[in-house]
Image (spheres, grey):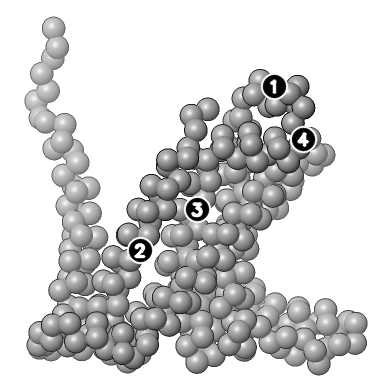
Amino acid sequence: MKQKLNRPLYFFIIPALVLYVVFWVAPVLMSFYYGFTDWSGVGDYNFVGLDNFKFLLQDGTLFNALKNTGIYTGFTVVFGNVLALFLASILNKKLKMKGVFRTVFYIPALFSTVVVAFIWSYVYAPYYGMIYSIFDLFGAGDAAPNLLGSTSTALIACAVVEQWKNCGTMTLIYLAGLQNLPDEVLESAKIDGCKWYQEFFKVKLPMIANTISVNVMLGLINGFKSFDYVFTLTGGGPGDSSSTLMHSVYKLAFVEYQYGTAEALAAAAFVLILVISCIVLFFFKKREVEV
């Protein structure tokens, strides 16, 4: 005979649900609400309809932020996954000191964002940084590039730092996927005469599609929320060449005190990120294979 519970099970999720609503749902709804006002952060405000969104389009802030975020995210997703999969494939082989290499690759993930940005600010620093020192070692110090000071390289330089920190995590995820592949399937591929590249692209990749989905989503998340390294290393500059969506929201709200416009940009970013994430997730989920 089944024993009746004194309280419904769902009663225990109420505290977590309340916190979720108060600290996530409510701020998102308020962001949409204030996006249609001229609120300056304090005091009264007026409803301005779509004026904030029109300003973002006419001013070019939205397009510039979308372009920079797209480049940043594309680099994070494509380069990050290719590099992580390459490293995982090497670590999956029978190597001496394999555990040491895994630890070394994962160490950057343990550092805080501020520490990582501080380290890389010295790597990129002109006239005394690591890159300059390497060029100077070969007598070409004057030719050392100022990666953070150039409009063409500042954004990618920040994305490299992001990837340096997160590559270890993505590598371990790929490594876990590769190690869970059935040995009999791989042995069958070898017996059938598959070359190493055929085995990799025709057998291994389809069977770790779910792992690829996870890492692609991680890359998308890191790219879309990119703010820390841009703010710390370049401040969105030179000009607005490295200003991403999140940095543009910060700049509008806390530098220019245009809170209504900032909320409008945040609301537009939320919708765009949600749509893109759902499309990408649906695309990769269709290609996943049960192992």
Q: Pointers 2 and 4 in contact (CB under 8 A)?
A: no
Marks 2 and 4 sit apart, C-alpha to C-alpha, by 40 Å
Residue 221 picture quarter: bottom left
Badge 1 is on which residue? 188
The residue tagged with tag 3: helix, strand or loop?
A: helix
Marks 2 and 1 sit apart, C-alpha to C-alpha, by 42 Å
Question: Farthest residue toward the top?
Answer: 1
Which of pointers 4 and 1 lies earlier in the amino acid sequence? 1
Badge 3 is on which residue? 216
The residue tagged with tag 1: helix, strand or loop?
A: helix
Quadrant where the image shows the N terminus: top left
Q: Reply above or below: 8 against 57.
A: above
Q: Pointers 2 and 3 in contact (CB under 8 A)?
A: no
Residue found at x 90% / y 87%: 139
The residue tagged with tag 2: helix, strand or loop?
A: helix
Residue 238 picture quarter: bottom right
Residue 223 pos. (x, y %): 47, 65
Residue 10 pos. (x, y %): 15, 36
Q: Pointers 1 and 3 in contact (CB under 8 A)?
A: no
Residue found at x 25% / y 77%: 263
